[in-house]
Image (cartoon, rainbow, N blue to C red):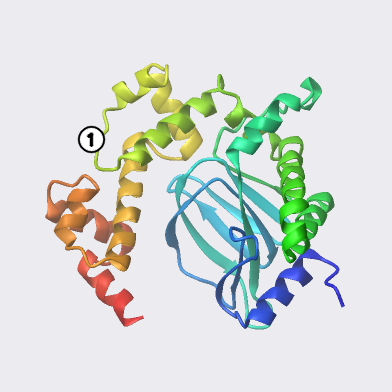
Amino acid sequence: MEPRTLLDYVLAQLDHSGVTQGVLTHKDGCTVFLTHPATTQHDANVYRPLLCAVLQGAKEVGTSTRMLTVRAGQSLIVSNALPVVSRITEAAPDHPYIALVFPLDLDLLRALAPSLPQSSAHRVSDPFSICLAPTCDDMQDALLRYFHQCETEEARHMLAPITAREIHARLLIGQHGGTLQKLVRHEATASRIFAATHEIRSDLGKPLVVGELAARVGMSSSAFFEHFKAVTGNSPLQYQKDLRLLHARNELQTTGSKVSEIAYGVGYESSAQFSREYTRKFGCSPRQDRVSEAVH
């Protein structure tokens, strides 16, 4: 019997694959289904532009200055690459946390934006890059159709791209629309901050001079600092530091490079300073983290 709801579909996929904790990548190659049977401690990560729909349980997501709780039936949009902390707040073995993460195609959003009627323009007072809203029935239906279409080669190539376009269009005209519309309009402040975050991410080892970056995106230093913090939840320097440490953690856990080499690669001139800031963020030293990961 074919699953009738989005939750039923994801549960069936997880069950068929034998995944009871962790991540399952869907047949489209980019969407992931998440499940966890218990609550968790805070974990640090980088969220790329995405749609995260919580289908069962609840999760807390945010930055050092802003936190949001996403419950079953809600979804969040992350419109910028953000260093975030998150933790699962509602989950149990007989009622696990279930969610899906659908990556956003910013080029597709930009291609769709000019077709928006003026009456569809959303006014958003909160510029924060994480936006929370109910997952409407039409969106759940579109996602379910998309997943079914990805299961056969013909439909994956012929129909799924059309439905993916529909999903992005529904995001633009739905409750998430204001956040996304501001991002894809080049003249908007959010678009300038997006360009700045992209420049920071492109070379984490490069020293950040805030005034020079502000000038390159066409803003004064004071306006840039204010809007950057409003959009990302962090100052430019803290944003860069969080990204550096998260990138370094990934290098520690996936390569055999020396700690000093990793520290230098993400812009630290002092291994001691790197170790202090790493320990402050993750609760253990770089060497302890590497040993812990090797044990697991």
Label 1 amino acid? Pro
Asked which quadrant contains residue 109, the reply is top right
Q: Residue at x 76, y 35 (%)?
A: 173
Q: Residue at x 64, y 65 (%)?
A: 26
Question: Split into 4 quadrants, where in the image is the N terminus?
Answer: bottom right
From the viewer's perspective, is 241 left or right of 218? left
The one nearer the camera, 53 or 39, is 53
* Image position, residue 223 (x, y; %): 42, 20
User: Compared to 4, does 213 lie above or below?
Assistant: above
Question: Split into 4 quadrants, where in the image is the C terminus?
Answer: bottom left
Q: Can residue 191 be seen here?
A: yes
Q: Residue at x 45, y 30 (%)?
A: 195
User: Compared to 97, does 104 lie above or below?
Assistant: above
* Image position, residue 228 (x, y; %): 44, 31
The one nearer the camera, 278 or 145, is 145
From the viewer's perspective, is 66 left or right of 6? left
Q: Which residue is mark 1?
A: 207
- Dot 1 crowding, Cα within 10 Å, few <14, some 14–19, many 20+: few
